[in-house]
Image (spheres, rainbow, N blue to C red):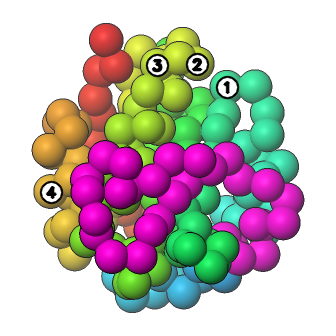
């Protein structure tokens, strides 16, 4: 497990992340279903409706994919993020997927720590480029993406089915 205290100093309650396990599936699904509507992302064309939401450990337990959950000191799942091949995309391109945090886990440095970890895992898995989709209103997330080197794109890549997203980014993993 990795802790934000290890990297960012004492930030209040310790948050750590680890690979997702089947016991985390229900909590992660509930988290995604709670967070996405906060940003108006609950209609058609958003990740909230992806079949994998209910079985994240299975969906990311395949070669070329990884997903990590963020837990607090009590063991409660408070966030997560992962990477997998971009659906309908070019070879060597992965997608940062389902990076969401409950309000109590935001602004503590864990988003950056987990994002950087996901990028390293993607590189280790052999991907050359990481792509992501988001939407207007997720301002803090977009600031973070820019901070770690993602560049805005003019159009989406691949065929994710997330037509509700209106912002797209990519980052080379070299």
Question: Which mark, by number, is residue 48?
Answer: none
Which residue in the protein does label 4 denote? 143
Which residue in the protein does label 2 denote? 125
The 10 Å Cα crowd at callout 1, few under 14, some 14 to 19, many 20 or more, is some
The reply to whether callout 4 and callout 1 are in contact (CB within 8 Å) is no
Q: Earlier in the sequence, mark 3 or mark 4?
A: 3
Q: Where in the figure is residue 94, as x and y percent of width and height?
A: 50, 30
> Quick check: 87 above or below 113?
above
The reply to whether callout 1 and callout 2 are in contact (CB within 8 Å) is yes
Separation (CA) of disc 3 from disc 4 = 22 Å
Range of the magenta residues?
A: 1-29
> Quick check: 154 above or below 140?
above
Q: Earlier in the sequence, mark 1 or mark 2?
A: 1
The 10 Å Cα crowd at callout 2, few under 14, some 14 to 19, many 20 or more, is some
The 10 Å Cα crowd at callout 3, few under 14, some 14 to 19, many 20 or more, is some
Separation (CA) of disc 3 from disc 1 = 10 Å
Question: Is residue 70 located in the magenta-colored stretch of the structure?
Answer: no
Separation (CA) of disc 2 from disc 4 = 26 Å
The reply to whether callout 2 and callout 3 are in contact (CB within 8 Å) is yes
Left or right of 48 on screen, residue 4: left
Question: Which mark, by number, is residue 64?
Answer: 1
Which quadrant is home to the C terminus? Answer: top left
Q: How many marks?
A: 4
Q: Looking at this view, is 107 or 52 the one in front?
A: 107
Question: Is residue 18 located in the magenta-colored stretch of the structure?
Answer: yes
Question: Which mark, by number, is residue 123?
Answer: 3
Q: Looking at this view, is 114 or 169 the one in front?
A: 114
Q: Residue drawn at (42%, 48%), measured in percent from left and top? A: 114
Quarter location, residue 101: bottom left
Separation (CA) of disc 2 from disc 3 = 5 Å
Q: Earlier in the sequence, mark 2 or mark 4?
A: 2
Q: Where in the figure is residue 17, as x and y percent of width and height?
A: 55, 54
């Amino acid at each position: 497990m990795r802790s934000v205290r290890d990297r960012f100093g004492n930030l209040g309650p310790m948050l750590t992340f680890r690979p997702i396990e089947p016991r985390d599936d229900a909590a992660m699904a509930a988290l995604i279903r709670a967070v996405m509507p906060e940003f108006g992302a609950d209609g058609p064309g958003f990740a909230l409706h992806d079949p994998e939401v209910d079985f994240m450990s299975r969906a990311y337990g395949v070669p070329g994919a990884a997903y990590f959950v963020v837990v607090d000191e009590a063991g409660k799942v408070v966030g997560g993020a992962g990477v997998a091949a971009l659906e309908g995309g070019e070879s060597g391109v992965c997608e940062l997927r389902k990076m969401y945090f409950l309000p109590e886990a935001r602004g503590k440095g864990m988003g950056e720590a987990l994002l950087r970890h996901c990028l390293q895992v993607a590189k280790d898995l052999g991907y050359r480029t990481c792509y992501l989709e988001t939407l207007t209103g997720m301002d803090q997330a977009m600031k973070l993406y820019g901070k770690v080197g993602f560049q805005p794109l003019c159009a989406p890549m691949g065929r994710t089915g997330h037509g509700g997203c209106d912002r797209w980014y990519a980052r080379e993993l070299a």
